[in-house]
Amino acid sequence: MNINMQYLVEVQSPTVFGEKHIAGTIFITLIIIALLILFLKVLKNVNPRKVLQWTTVFLLSLELAKYTEALSGGGSFPRHYIPMQLCSFSLYLMPIVAFGKGKLKTFFEPTCFAVGLLAGLIVLIYPATVLGGDYDWLPLTGNIIPIISFLYHGTMIFFSLYLLLSKQFRPEIKQYPRVYLSLLVFAGMAMITNAIFDTDMMFLNTGAGSPFQFILTNYGRPIYMVVMAALAVLLLFLPFIPSYTANFIEMLKKKNRTMPQKN
């Protein structure tokens, strides 16, 4: 009897890189690829700005659906639903990029691209906090919040990739400082939220669900904060590597063309 109960507990708790995680990630990846092909190849005459706007509205609808499900199911608004997670960046930046114009749009485009792509990929790769409590995706009624979460982060990734591939935005390494500065400002806001509501926004309080929580536990908060800041430096650079590499190669080509030729 004890063995059976232990088995039931184990199968009801989905794990990172388990069947539920892999199936959900593959499904969302296929959707992203299909949509990119649809709007870049099949419906390539559709105004890219309209696609970005539709995507933004869909993301906001998913967030509203999450709130509605929480209020209808529990009758109260969970504190961890306060939109101050790293992924919440997209709630604020995607509308600016999709609907905005001028300097404000230009300023936040790199951050929207980098954070949307990075945060979305991180959650699909390591969805420790969004897998839900049921072992499998069925029944769907027991997985409403995990389904919303996977669709939400998939939408973030699609927005960033479409922004890039439709040539609406070109990442450049000189944009990187403003992206990191924006993240630091948002992290400060998340820390204030944590202090007021005793939450764990951006894993900057208890680090629950973070693979780096052991640093906080074993070495203390100052070291943990330094590590998190250093990780942000590294990870935020990743979306700019292709652009940096292309610019570096182009610079070498220009240098070779201007060099005097030996007879």
Image: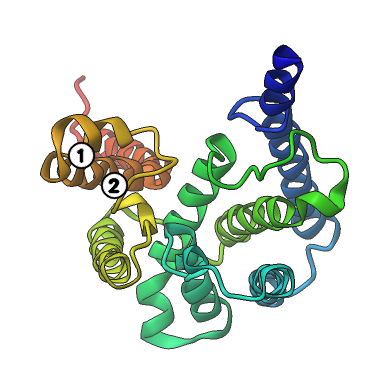
SS at circle 2: helix
User: Label 2 belongs to which residue?
Assistant: 232
List the residue tagged with mark 1.
227
Residue plotted at (70% across, 15% down): 2
Residue 183: x and y, percent?
30, 62
Q: Are marks 2 and 1 in contact (CB under 8 Å)?
A: no
Quadrant occupied by the N terminus? top right
Mark 1 lies on a secondary structure that is helix
In depth, the one of 14 and 100 nearer the eye is: 14
Sequence-wise first label, 2 or 1: 1
Against 126, is 17 above or below? above
In terms of depth relative to the viewer, which is nearer, 93 or 128?
128
Name which residue lies at 29% across and 37% down: 257
Number of marks drawn: 2
The local crowd at label 1, few if under 14, some if 14 to 19, many if 20 or more residues have their Cα within 10 Å, is some
What residue type is disc 2 on? Ala
Task: Tell me which colouring the rendered structure shows.
Answer: rainbow
Alpha carbon distance from label 2 to label 1? 9 Å
In percent of width and height, residue 22 lies at 70, 30
Left or right position of 187 against 132: left
**Tag 1: amino acid:** Val
In the image: residue 248, left or right of residue 51: left
Q: Is residue 209 above or below residue 219?
A: below
Residue at point 64%, 70% (across, down): 63
> Which residue is situated farthest in the front direction here?
1
Residue 214, located in which quarter of the rendered image? top left
Looking at this view, is 107 or 56 the one in front? 56
For the residues carrying marks 2 and 1, which lies nearer the camera in this image? 1
Name the quarter where the C terminus is drawn. top left
